[in-house]
Amino acid sequence: MSKIFIEDEEFENLNSLAEGSYENCVFDHCDFSNSTLSECVFSECEFYNCNLTTAGITNTAFRDVKFKDCKLMGLYFNSCNAFLLEFEFENCNLNLSSFFKLKLKNTKFTDCTLHEVDFTETDLSGAKFENCDLRLATFENSILETTDFRTAYNYLIDLEANRISKAKFSTAGLAGLLGKYDIVIE
């Protein structure tokens, strides 16, 4: 069976997709939760108000993809195709997702909820977490050099277990950096 190639199309209210390549496409109010998007290639695509919760994304390629107002809970982004991986998230729920060992340099997260997200061994150099809730997110052996956490909150980052040179934090976020020392900050 041959894979399809679609470009410059807009899709609304879908709940499944054919395996193939989608270039410069817009997906609006689609519910792909619990569906399989494996082996798909999304290049320069935009997702608005979509639900991809626990969707299968094995070997899925996300190349310059934007997600806005989307629900992306429980996704294993570490299982997708890492070649030219690039995306940004705005006002998205990414709770319980995993970015384990991915290179996410300069990735932008804006107004996102990232509870219990796994960033273990992830390269987040130059990434920006703008007004993001990182409650119980895991940062271990992560590269956080020049990463911007100034408006992020609820994070706990072990300074000794991550590379953080020139990372940016606000004074309000210092408790998230010193939490392991069991000290009181007033």
Image (cartoon, grey):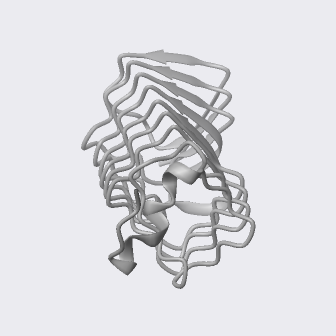
Q: Is residue 12 above or below residue 142?
A: above
Q: Residue furthest left?
A: 34
Q: Is residue 46 left or right of residue 28?
A: right
Residue under the image location 45 percent in, 38 percent down: 112
Q: Is residue 140 above or below residue 43?
A: below
Tell me residue 87's x, y (percent). Answer: 62, 44
Tell me residue 52's x, y (percent). Answer: 35, 38
Viewer-proximal residue among 96 and 52: 96
Residue under the image location 40 percent in, 68 percent down: 138
Viewer-proximal residue among 93 and 61: 93
Q: Is residue 112 left or right of residue 24?
A: left
Q: Residue furthest front?
A: 186
Q: Is residue 12 left or right of residue 31?
A: right
Residue under the image location 65 percent in, 72 percent down: 164
Q: Residue furthest bottom?
A: 160
Q: Is residue 132 above or below residue 13?
A: below
Viewer-proximal residue among 116 and 79: 116
Quadrant where the C terminus is found in the figure: bottom left
The tally of labels here is 0
Q: Is residue 85 left or right of residue 58?
A: right
Tell me residue 23's x, y (percent). Answer: 67, 33
Tell me residue 129's x, y (percent). Answer: 57, 46
Viewer-proximal residue among 77 and 163: 163
Residue under the image location 46 percent in, 58 percent down: 77
